[in-house]
Image: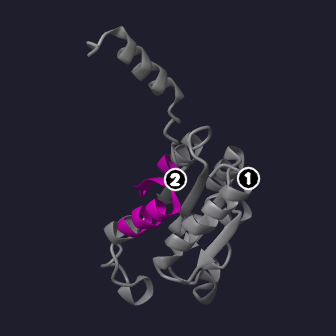
């Protein structure tokens, strides 16, 4: 019988060095603009009865199934949203954004999305093209890889699936 000595420890260290490293899933920023904190109570005939917490849960579930990590945020402040977009540079692999009212007004948000040079999927719960004329133009669309509109909160899951496919094509996922 051999007593345990340094040899077993040395073997454990060698094994630890040869184990595959845990892969970090690609991070997707899921950013939401103004008034989306009121989902479920604000104009349910247009936006439905789901809350922002429901959207976050849907995104978390979709991300887990797709092997992605998410950073889910909402703000009513344009400057804060732009800062979050800029912070994605070098940190995130893609952005899902529902810019809400800033879609139609924020050239600064469009510029920030272009500057980060990441795939961007723009999401709208309602079909902005069936609504008031001023909603038909989205500056954010000019920076987006793709746009999903009018499919309710399910559009977020579709956006994450689209990003996962894009990242796979690029070899990141």
Circle 1 is placed at which residue position?
Answer: 170
Precedes in sequence: disc 2 or disc 1: 2
Question: Is residue 146 positioned above or below 27 on the image?
Answer: below
Q: Residue at x 55, y 62 (%)?
A: 97
- Is 7 positioned to the left or the right of 151 in the image? left
Residue at image x 42%, y 14%?
10
Nearest to the observer: residue 119 or residue 84: 119
Q: Residues within 10 Å of mark 2 (few under 14, many from 20)?
A: many
138 lies left or right of 62: right
Q: Residue furthest top?
A: 6
Which residue is more in the foreground, 51 or 9?
9
Mark identifier at residue 29 = 2
Q: How is the image coloured?
A: one colour
Magenta residue check for 50 = no
Q: Which residues are magenta?
A: 57-81
Q: Inspect this view and state whether residue 77 appears.
A: no
Tally the marks.
Answer: 2
Give percent across and percent down for residue 33: 47, 61
Residue 8: x %, y % from top left: 36, 17
Magenta-drawn stretch contains 62: yes
Image check: 143 left or right of 164? right
């Amino acid at each position: 019988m051999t007593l345990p000595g340094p040899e077993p420890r040395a073997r454990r260290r060698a094994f630890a060095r040869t184990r595959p490293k845990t892969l970090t899933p690609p991070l997707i920023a899921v950013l939401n603009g103004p008034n989306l904190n009121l989902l479920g109570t604000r104009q349910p005939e247009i936006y439905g009865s789901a809350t922002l917490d429901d959207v976050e849960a849907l995104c978390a579930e979709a991300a887990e199934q797709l092997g992605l990590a998410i950073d889910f945020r909402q703000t009513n402040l344009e400057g804060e949203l732009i800062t979050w977009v800029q912070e994605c540079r070098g940190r995130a692999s893609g952005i899902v954004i529902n810019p809400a009212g800033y879609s139609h007004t924020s050239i600064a948000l469009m510029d920030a999305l272009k500057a980060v040079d990441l795939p961007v999927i723009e999401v709208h719960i309602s079909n902005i093209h069936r609504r008031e004329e001023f909603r038909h133009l989205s500056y954010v669309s000019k920076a987006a890889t793709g746009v999903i509109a009018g499919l309710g909160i399910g559009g977020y899951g579709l956006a994450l699936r689209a990003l996962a496919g894009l990242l796979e094509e690029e070899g990141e996922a």
